Image (spheres, grey):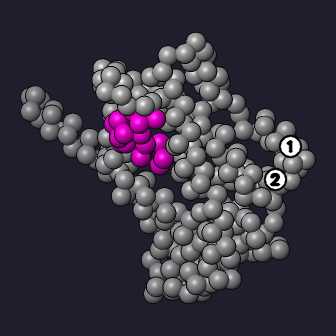
Amino acid sequence: MNTSGGKWIGNILGKLLVFIIVVITVYPVFWLLMSSLKAPGEFSTSPMYTLPESFHIQNYIDAWKDGNMGVYFRNSIIATFPSLLFIILFGAAAAFAIEKMRWKISRGMLLVFLVGIMVPVPIVLLPLFTIFFNVGLLNNLLGLILVYVAFGLPLTIFLFTSYFKAVPNELIESAVMDGASIYRIFISIAMPMIMNAVVTVTLVQFFFVWNDLIFAMTFISDSELRTIQTGLMSFSGEYGQRQWGPTFAAISMAVLPTLILYLFLNKTVMKGMTSGAVKG
């Protein structure tokens, strides 16, 4: 076999491998969306892999109204977006101070935050539960926000520190010589230069907070304060029976925000990850 024939076969095998990976990745989401549109009778009369006979939109209406998904969405939004704001704001400020400002224990502080990445979540649940019980933060979305910020900061600071290394020190020194304050340099010069990284980190933290189950299950028991992930568990009946149509519709609604965000921010995320890999 000549060289061109070997390259042709390698090219075909590569494309086949990519096609298989795409099918394995996309098909579960496609199957979920199609199942959410099936009528109740189709789940017992047709195989699970078949397409719906018609679009049964009533599943989404039942999930939103009877399944309380509107309340779960509201609670998830209240817990997620303030958490992301604080994680990005505090994380960027801490990373800028560690990487661009000179003070004695800056490297030591970075190590402290890196240790936070390695703390397993199950270990802190009982101490946090005890603290929240004593200060009245159980069944309170503010408690969830505090936990998400505390667990999101170590990784955010670590990533932002590597991105701030790419910001030239000469640029900051010139701004200082022109009389700019440290806050002006941080907001007007440093932050715009790592905006791709901000989008990337925001999306990563959004996945963590939006899909969290363990913290929400531990600290929230009030049905009116449940987030989406814990709310999905209420779609199971007393003896484990389910209405599969509204259940699949609820899961689809929980997944859609993540998919939409990733589709819109895909290119920016790739730029942020690439720049971090090269310059970090």
Label 2: few (<14), some (14–19) or many (≥20) C-alpha neighbours in 10 Å? some
Question: What SS does tag 1 mark?
Answer: helix
Q: How many marks?
A: 2
> Which quadrant would the N terminus be assigned to in this image?
top left
Q: Is residue 259 left or right of residue 212?
A: left
Q: Which residues are magenta?
A: 183-204
Q: Is residue 153 left or right of residue 272?
A: right
Whether residue 11 is in magenta: the answer is no
Secondary structure mainly formed by the magenta segment: helix
According to the image, label 2 marks what residue? 137
Question: What SS does tag 2 mark?
Answer: loop
| Residue 131 place in picture, x, y as percent | 86, 43
- Whether residue 122 is visible to the viewer of this picture, yes or no, is yes
Q: Is residue 182 left or right of residue 215?
A: left
Q: Name the residue furthest top.
A: 104
Name the foreground residue: 191 vs 250. 191
Q: Residue 114: name its quadrant.
A: top right
Whether residue 198 is in magenta: the answer is yes
Discs 1, 2 touching: Cβ within 8 Å: yes
Residue at 74% in and 66% down: 225
- Whether residue 28 is visible to the viewer of this picture, yes or no, is no
| Residue 11 place in picture, x, y as percent | 20, 40
| Residue 277 place in picture, x, y as percent | 37, 29
Mark 1 → mark 2, Cα distance in angstroms = 8 Å
Residue at 81% in and 53% down: 137
> Which quadrant would the C terminus be assigned to in this image?
top left
Residue at 59% in and 54% down: 82
According to the image, label 1 marks what residue? 131
| Residue 5 place in picture, x, y as percent | 11, 35
